[in-house]
Image (cartoon, rainbow, N blue to C red):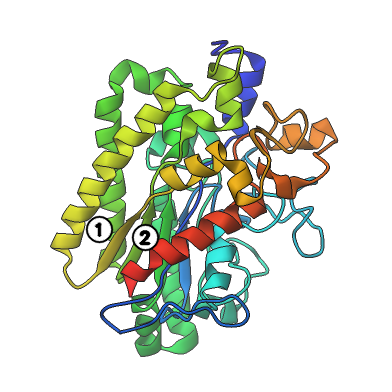
Amino acid sequence: MMLFSYWRKLVVVIVVFSTVILVSDSTASDHHHHHQENGNGTVPSSFTAVIIFGDSIMDTGNNNFLPTISKCNFPPYGKDFPGHRPTGRFSNGKVPSDLIASRLGIKEFVPAYLSPELESKDLITGVCFASGASGYDPLTSQLNSVLSMDHQLELFQDYKFKLQENVGKIRANTIIEKSLYVISSGSNDVANTYFTGLFRRTHYSFSDYAVFLVQSASSFIQDLHQLGARSIAILSLPPLGCLPSQRTLAGGLLRDCVGLYNQAAQEYNTLLIKEIQSLSNKFSGSKIIYVDIYNKLLDIIQRPKHYGLEVSTNGCCGTGTLELGILCKLSGKTCIDDTKYVFWDTFHPTQRTYEILVDLVVKEDIALLY
């Protein structure tokens, strides 16, 4: 498996994914909302803000301001972003954080909390704390010099304080209570820290590691609830074995999806579902939902043409078999039409795929939150 080959190390260090994508909200029972889109494609929502936690799927630029090599603030990243500029989003354009906020009619872009360009007015409608290459396992963030989930929670507390300074305690508390919270994490833990590294595998069977991760996720959700969050969406792991990089590294000569990695993701997801159900019962006044990204993305990968896509086994940048992060820059080339590709680099989907996923999530999952 070339576990410690030069290429694999590069992929692991630069990587990030926590897989892919997302969540939101719509329709429903309690407030008798109807799922109807406005003419501009947005879905009416009772949420005042979107608050994002997690990894590179959601990071809108926080890693630009951290001492990590897990960055993408250089071309060809951002080539389809407004202004054709790299922003630190691990995509050719927007990421789920932006698309969810836009789809719900809140705002077009969710700013990175660490950005020096962040303005007071941005706080009112939500910010992003996500950090590429992070995970629920503290070791994952330590290895990549990025924001751990605990650190992201500390920044959220700082955000609450700044929000109170700007709009007063009463309005700040209302914003906190009526915000949508989206969490995307765990992919880097499983794909990189566990399967590529040795330390965790010498101390844990995967089943035990999955329990450890879900317990960490549960603690994070409970801490977030304690800080005022009431509508929380937690993304599942994606089919990690079908990411182009994993196909290359462990899928054999034919670059098949890696069954072991997909089974691991499913095992984790099953535990996560049970834990979220438990937390939902514990916090009866809140809404905590599981968002199935696994099956949504797997269907896109297996039936790309059904979604207007064509290539699902390779990424758009470079050869599409191993490049991501700095390797995309060094390759100096991209595919001709990224709107036909499921993946942008070998770990992250294209903006087009994110749009398809977000639309599915808004229609199928968000309704459960209000």
State which quarter of the image contains the C terminus: bottom left
Q: Which mark is residue 351?
A: none
Q: Position of residue 126 (x, y in %)?
A: 50, 72
User: In the depicted view, which residue is nearer to us: 68 or 274?
Assistant: 274
Assign a secondary structure to mark 2.
Answer: strand
The amino acid marked with disc number 1 is Gln
284 horizontally vs 139: left or right: left
- The mark that comes first in sequence, 1 or 2, is 1
Q: Nearer the viewer, mark 1 or mark 2?
A: 2
Q: Position of residue 250 (x, y in %)?
A: 53, 17
At x 40%, y 22%, the residue is 260
The amino acid marked with disc number 2 is Ala
Q: CA distance from mark 1 to mark 2?
A: 13 Å
The image quarter containing residue 153 is: bottom left
At x 85%, y 35%, the residue is 332
Q: Is residue 19 visible?
A: no
At x 49%, y 42%, the residue is 299
- Label 2 belongs to which residue? 233
Q: Position of residue 33 (x, y in %)?
A: 36, 83
Q: Position of residue 273 (x, y in %)?
A: 26, 48
Q: Residues within 10 Å of mark 1 (few under 14, many from 20)?
A: some
The answer to the question of whether label 1 and label 2 lie on touching residues, with beta carbons closer than 8 A, is no
Vertical placement of 202 versus 44: above or below? above
The image quarter containing residue 174 is: bottom left
Q: Is residue 26 visible?
A: yes
278 horizontally vs 291: left or right: left
State which quarter of the image contains the N terminus: top right
Q: Residues within 10 Å of mark 2 (few under 14, many from 20)?
A: many
231 horizontally vs 19: left or right: left
Q: Which mark is residue 222?
A: 1
